[in-house]
Structures are given as C-alpha cells and as structure tokens.
Amino acid sequence: MRHLIDFGDLSRREWESLYARASRIMDNPAGFIDACRGRVMASLFYEPSTRTNFSFQTAMLRLGGTVFGFADPSSSSVAKGETLKDTVKMVSGYADVVVMRTPWEGAAKAASLYSHVPVVNAGDGGHMHPTQTTADLTTITRLLGRVDGLSVGLCGDLKNGRTVHSLIKALAKFENIQFFLISPRELAVPDYMRAFMRENNMRFTAVTGLEAVIPQLDVLYMTRIQRERFVDPLEYERNKGVYILTRRKLDRAKEHMLVMHPLPRVDEITVDVDDDPRAVYFEQARYGMFARMALLADLANQPRLDRPQAVEIGTTPVCRNPRCITRTEYYLPPLVKKNGGVDCCAFCDAALD
Amino acid sequence: MRHLIDFGDLSRREWESLYARASRIMDNPAGFIDACRGRVMASLFYEPSTRTNFSFQTAMLRLGGTVFGFADPSSSSVAKGETLKDTVKMVSGYADVVVMRTPWEGAAKAASLYSHVPVVNAGDGGHMHPTQTTADLTTITRLLGRVDGLSVGLCGDLKNGRTVHSLIKALAKFENIQFFLISPRELAVPDYMRAFMRENNMRFTAVTGLEAVIPQLDVLYMTRIQRERFVDPLEYERNKGVYILTRRKLDRAKEHMLVMHPLPRVDEITVDVDDDPRAVYFEQARYGMFARMALLADLANQPRLDRPQAVEIGTTPVCRNPRCITRTEYYLPPLVKKNGGVDCCAFCDAALD
Amino acid sequence: MRHLIDFGDLSRREWESLYARASRIMDNPAGFIDACRGRVMASLFYEPSTRTNFSFQTAMLRLGGTVFGFADPSSSSVAKGETLKDTVKMVSGYADVVVMRTPWEGAAKAASLYSHVPVVNAGDGGHMHPTQTTADLTTITRLLGRVDGLSVGLCGDLKNGRTVHSLIKALAKFENIQFFLISPRELAVPDYMRAFMRENNMRFTAVTGLEAVIPQLDVLYMTRIQRERFVDPLEYERNKGVYILTRRKLDRAKEHMLVMHPLPRVDEITVDVDDDPRAVYFEQARYGMFARMALLADLANQPRLDRPQAVEIGTTPVCRNPRCITRTEYYLPPLVKKNGGVDCCAFCDAALD
C-alpha cells in the first residue's frame, strides 16, 4: 500500500496485516514511541473535523513523529489562488505523509497522483472515509476477537450515512456476517447498497424496530437521525423514540454485545447507557487512534519519490458529479474505472453517462 | 494530586513539593528534557488566551512532550453538537493530560469527573485560574527566597480581579503576610474577601494612594484599572494617575522590591520602569512556564484510568449562577460543598439558596 | 549573526557558511535529526503566509525542535491591547528563537531590540523577506554548482516584486552576473534599483520579450503579473501572453537552465512545463526548507540573553512611512542609518526628510 484512499483498495490480507500492527501497538505502546521519529505529517483539513484531526495528530505524536498543517480553510491561505496540485507538490516537499480532509469528492485520489509522499484520505466529502472503517473494524476485532460470523445491527439513518455504507462495503471482505438494517422506511439503505450486498452474498434483514432484534446482535452500530432528513417532520416526531438506545432496551441484549457510534452523538443514546460495559463508543474513538498509528507507522516511513510519474494533463472534466474534484481542477487526467461493469469516474466513483 | 482545579485544593506541603520541582527544573532544565517523553497534552481553549496557552504549550514541549488542541472555539467544531462530557471522554482517550480554558465557571471540575487522565484548570470564567497563582508564588519564592513574612501591596482594581483574589486566598497558606490594599474606594476588595482575610487572621491595610506605602513593600502587585469599571468616568480621569507606576515613584521603594503584573499591561506601568531591575513582570511570565513544567511533569505521567468512577446523573440544575457549567450541561451530578459553613455549588462555588 | 532581519546584513562569507551547513543537511538529513533537540521556536504570523509558515515549521521539526505560535492574528489575542515590545518580551521568555511575519515594515528589527533570543524576519510588509532569498540562492548553488558568472533572467512584474528586488540586491555579493530584465515597460525595475545595479557594477539588459533572450539564460526567474498593476487593462490583455512560460518556449532554452518561481503561481507557467526537468520551482520550495534548517540550527542554539541591552525610549516617530512600525509603537528608539549616503529609518529603510 502506497496511499490509503478507499478502504476497498485493501485486500483482506493487507487489512489483517494492518490490524496485527495495531494490535502490537495496543499491547505495547512504549515499543512504538520512536516508530516515526524524525518523520513529519502534514494535516490538511480543508473543512473542520475535530475528532478525525485530533485522532490523526495524536497517532503521529505517539509514534514520536511531528505534525504541521491547518485545521480549516479559514486558518490557511493555501486554498487561495493555487491549484490542489501545486499545494500538494509544495506540502509533499516538506512532509513524509499527507493526511487530507476535503469537501470535494475524489480530492485525496487527485492529490495522490502528484504527491512525493503517501496520501491518506481523512474524508473526501460524502465519498470515502476509510480510517473511520479501520477504527470500527479494529474495535470489533479487539473486543470480540473476530469479525467473521457476527450479527451486526445498523440502526438509524441508513440512507445518508457515509459511515454505514463504508462499513457494509468493508464487511464484504469477511465471512458469514448477518446484518440487521434498522431504520424508518424513509431512511432505509439505498437500492445500490442492497444490490451490492446481494452481489456479495451478504445476508441481511431490514426492520423498522430496534427492540425486537436487539437480543440477536453481537454489534449494534448506532447513527444519528437528523430531523431535516424527513419529508414530514411529524413522521420524525412519531419515529424518533424507536431509534433511541436506552438502558432499558439494553436489558435484552447479549452480555458481550458492543454498542458502537461514530460520534458525535446527539440524543440517540441516552447518557445512562454510558456506564454500561457494553457501551464502547468512547473506546472506539481510542481504538481509531491506534488503528491510525498502525497506518502511519507504515506510510510515514516509506521512501520519498523524487519525481512521481507524470500523468496525462486533462483539459475538460468528464465527470458530471458537481461535487467531484475534477469539476474545479481542470488539469486532472480523465481517469475512468469500472465499478460492477459500469464506467465510473476514478476520482469520485460517480457513474459516467 | 490527580487534577488541578483550584489552588485552594493544594495543601501547603503539596505546594512546597510543586515549588521544589519547579526549582530543580530552573536550576537544571536540561535534566528534564525527557520528563514527558511520549506524553501528549490536550490544550482545549474554548476562549482565546494567548499567554496562558503559550505558557502551557512551551512547558510541555520543554519536557519533551507534545501538544494538540485548539486555541479558540472558532477553530474547532468540538464545541458544537456535543456535550462537554462527550468531548472529554474523546479527548482523554487521546491525551495523557487535559488543559482547559473555558468561559463557563466550574467546567474544569465537571470535566475532571469524566476524564480518564488528569485535568488542569487554565481558567474557568471569572472563577479560578490556579496556575496564575503558581506563577506568582514561584516568582516571589525564587526571587525573595520565601513568602512568609513579606509585605505585599496589591494595587489597582481589587474589586474585579480574579488574579488578586486568588493570590490573597493562596497567601492564607503562608505566615505573617502584611497586605496593603491600594485602590480607589469604588474598586476596593469585596466584603467577602475582607471576611475571608479576617477569618484567616491576615493583616491588611486599605489605602487609596500608592506613593505613601511603596517604601514598606517587598512585593508590589500591579493590576489594570479599566475605565468602564467606574460609574463616573470623571472619577476615573481624576484617579488614574495615582495607580500608574512610574520610575519616579520607584525611587522610594526598597531595593529588593518586586514589581509584578499578570500581563498584559496597558499603561499602568510606564515603559521606563521596564529597565529597572525590580521590574520582574516579564520574568514572572517565564517563571509561570517553569511552574507549569513542574505541574505537568507530575500530572502527565500519572496512570490512565481505564474506567473513571461512574457519577450520579443529574436531571435539573441546582445552581442559579447563570455562568455555571451546570446550567447548560444538565447531566452533571447535583454536587454540593460547604464554603465557610454555607452550602455552595461544588462546580462554581456560588452559594445555593 | 545574532538575528536575521535583512539578507544584506550577511557578508558573503556568512552566506557561504550558511550554505555549507544547508548542503551538509541535504547530504545527510539524518545527521541533523537532533540538532535542535529541546529547542522551541515561536512562530508569530501576524498575517497569513502558509508557505513560509509551513517551511519554517517543518525546518524546525526536522531538526528535532518544536514549534508554537499563531498562524494569523485572528487566531490570537496577542495583537490586542499589548505593544510589540511586551509580546516579544513574553514570547522570548518561552522560546529559543522567534520567527516573525508582519504587515508592518521594520517590525522584526524592532522585535530584535527587546528579544532575549534570536529573531528571524519572515517578511515585514513590502520591506524584506531574507529567507526567500536564501531559498533562491540555495536552489541555484545546489543545482548549478555556483552563482558567480551566471546569466539570470528576471521575468514578469519587476516593478512591484519584493522577491525580485531582494534577489538583485543579494546577487550584488556575487561576481560577474549578467541580468536580463524581462518585463512590460510599465512594470520595469524601478529607477533606484537601476541606480543600485550601476553603483555595484552589475551588468543588465532590459527587454520586453522573453522568447528572444531565453536561449542565453542559466536561470529564468518567473514572477506573476497582476492585471490590477496595469493602468490600462487592455494593455494587460495585449501583453500577458508574452510573459507566460510554455513548454514550446522552453524548447530554445539551455538544457541546464533552471525555471524558478517564488510560488504561488497563477497562470504564468503552464501546467505542461511542470514535467520538464528544468522546472525546479517545487524543488525550490523544498530547498527553502533546507536553507531554513541551516539557519535555525545556528540561531536556535545561541545562548539566551538574561537582560538584553536597554535602548533609548522614543517619544515621537521620526519616520514618515505610514507602514513603518515606528508609526504605531511610539516607544521605539529614533534610530537612523545611512543608505548610500542618505539618512534612512533604521527600521523600514525609508529615506528621512
């Protein structure tokens, strides 16, 4: 692995090797105190994301590395009057690894074409956020000993959640997972995700209530339901209680079940759940830091390329996704890839006409 | 000591041990270059305070530790859509010590209930700022050899100054201090502070002029008088010169007297005083850094709690102080403590009805 | 050298010693990984300048040092309610070296009078930016083996560019340079720069076209032409193509010619030039980092002054340059220096009446 742009780029074997390193770090953090000594991480957050930013920063610092960058575009003039390519050329001249968060889909992929050093995607719009997935899988593997064969409940807004879709795609690499998709009908998993699950022989059951299925779960992954996602606000008011996890609902859950949440939560998990040993959402954030340590210990130590391979110079965008990075950075090459037989933009994965 | 929330929580013995460590650091900074190696400090400044922020950061860096965080709420999305508890759970999963500055009274105390690692109060509204006091006491002890038995002049706005009130309270731990309270009548020390001083058998004289008492002082602690604190602006204009320290007024001071100031100054000390050897306000800032090094060398190396003790979950605020953290974070436990026999809020120290 | 305020303060010998250190660092970066261990750099950017800021930060981090500071005034309250002197006294109590970028001309010089530690000018308004010049000279020396005897083309807006004027002045320290000044007549090098070049026996030819002279150049230094610099916008439209470097124009250039640019570029160099081996503007940024490492490895390790020498206290500004630091910081001493026989402000170099 040279860059981490999409969790799907990892083979199961690469994931296992990454987890094994995370595991060694968790068992013996002191042994990694100099793993990135002398290495510098650029942290380019073109939109604020405090949790992800802090997690990457502390991961690098705990490896003995150092960090520079910006936390949002207002604290930087980089974004102004310069192409993404030029910024990446400059920054990858200073850094040993570049971590990028952007509102533009495909931006990390674009940066990876020009960078002299590895690029990590810390979220590119609604597209990908692979290190959230590594955090989730690290939590499950560390606490339950495996991922294969588990019953996983996904609860809340399953229509709009990037986190949930990434997790489903990642779990396709594992065996014999049973999904429970728990959501209001309005916010069910989209059709293309159902198609993906069927193609990959993933078993799933869609339900509208949490209480009935909770006793069967090994993992309950909670997400937030935003009022503004509902066409009818009354529908929201009628429904919201169903998807709130309370201490009482936990009574019927297995003793080893994990309650997970990508954070921040609003009120979808009541405060009295926090003291239940099954509530692991805060530990999950900490496991995310260890997973990022495992990633950076590898990537920040890769040799710098003096001259990355030249790529074709684009002239007009081929992708029509208005949030795609190719819509504003015209010089990007017109790269196309196949997703399930369909021609897609190699940056943002949108289907091409 | 597990957290530093209020200087009053320290016994004299604990203070002496802290100062002894600060003293060893000042004598031999190179000996502490790795005292916090591998340790990470979270610096959460919910309101900007450059001086305090820089002092804590450089303290940690000079111990070989590292720092992450935010310098004001606008550079962070942490404050949005998340309780203080959830932020502290997350951040204390990444850090070995948490330094917090907030506009809300009692916030550091609240954070300490949920944190997995030690919390340091870097100022919680108008309530407490214990490390300013450690800076002040370190300066006096280092330069005069002792605190017991000194004549201490406090000059300026003694009514509104958190710094001055904290210093008076801290000096109650010492023997035989003689105070001169130098202020306009409108800005005299409040009644409850006078009551405190009497209860603790502290000797004090209130005067309205600086020049008459300056020859008796070992320490002259200057503070700013803000025009807007006066009911009558003319009264301000008539008075302001009296409380400005000039080189001429220094002529009658003892040769070893210390001129101190918490900074920033505006015009309450004229620039020509800076070159007088008695002017130690810039050194005071530097001593503050050493005092914070002594604090962090201890706290950042304490073992992490995997599971802090669960606390009661509150439902309605019991405190009526509108700036108290309990007014917005409803889940906080309804903790009460006695201050001089009176029931007070355990977060902000306001008297309860 | 105690401070770096103006490249002109360096003797050729001092420059050569600085370059020799940069060269040793580039040959063996791992040998300098602890050169600033335990040292702390203050990075005070009173106006944003991401490139310069990142370059200084990574320079310090790669020497094993650490960094604190602010990236623009909005993220700091330092600028408010405090003189530059007081800020510098405080910050130089925490740091081992202070790097300053300000919009005020002469600010770094002013800071150096009060600082306990070395001060580096990272740009003071339109006045000086000495480390850009060290980056430029390091690039040329490293890639061409020498500076003496080269043909140097300066192309674009030669009237307003601080970078270009600094480079010309710096090149006066070298032998036998042949300049080609390539610009529209409206944006030619100012008269005082021509006078400077004549006084220093520097050979130069002013031309309005790039293509005719490109075959003679060893270095082509490109700069941006801003539309708003032209009195007549039509003149801009007629001219702009002449000063854009394309792959085709490069065909006639020498094989070893360097294309340089201070960055950011807008469209004055087309993207297809980037893959030409002569395009070194991104490497130039990286050489800038190594040059700053060489500088900091020296300055950050100098002994701290416990008491900088007292300076005269000013009362009224003597300089009439409205952007001069002495116009707002009244206490600065009324320092005067001779530039070519003329009395000038020792802070901003403006001629005094």
Image (tube, coloured by chain):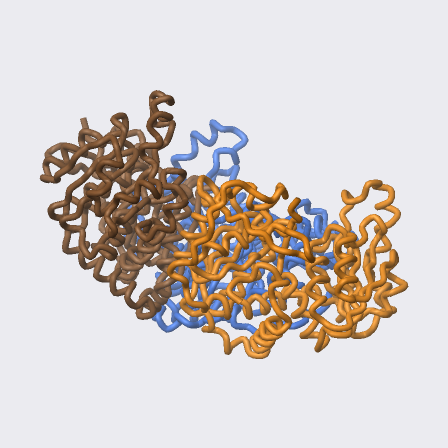
Chain colours: A blue, B brown, C orange
Q: Position of residue C257 (x, y in %)?
A: 78, 71
Above or below, comparing residue B342 to residue C352 in the picture:
above
The quadrant the N terminus of chain B occupies is: bottom left
Point out the image quarter for the C terminus of chain B.
top left
Instruction: Tell me if C215 is positioned left or right of C131 in this view.
Output: right
Q: Is residue C188 left or right of residue A163?
A: right
In the rendered image, which quarter is residue B78 located in?
top left
- The part of the image, by quadrant, that contains residue A3 is bottom right
Query: Where in the figure is residue A73, as x and y percent of width and height?
Result: 57, 47
Residue A206: x and y in percent read 48, 46
Say whether residue B94 is left or right of residue C225: left
Give the left or right position of residue A187, taking residue A315 as reference.
Answer: left
Q: Residue at x 54, y 48 (%)?
A: C334
Extreme-right residue of the structure: C212
How many marks do you count on the picture? 0
**Position in image of residue C1 (x %, y %):** 53, 67
Taking depth in this image into account, of B278 and A147 the one nearest to the observer is B278
Q: Who is closer to the viewer here, B121 or A23?
A: B121
Q: Could you tell me if residue C243 is visible in this image?
A: yes
In this orientation, which residue lies closer to the viewer: C297 or A339? C297
Q: Residue at x 42, y 35 (%)?
A: A240
**Where A252 falls versus A84 (above or below)?**
above
| Rendered position, A108 above or below C325 | below
Observer-nearest of B141 and A42? B141
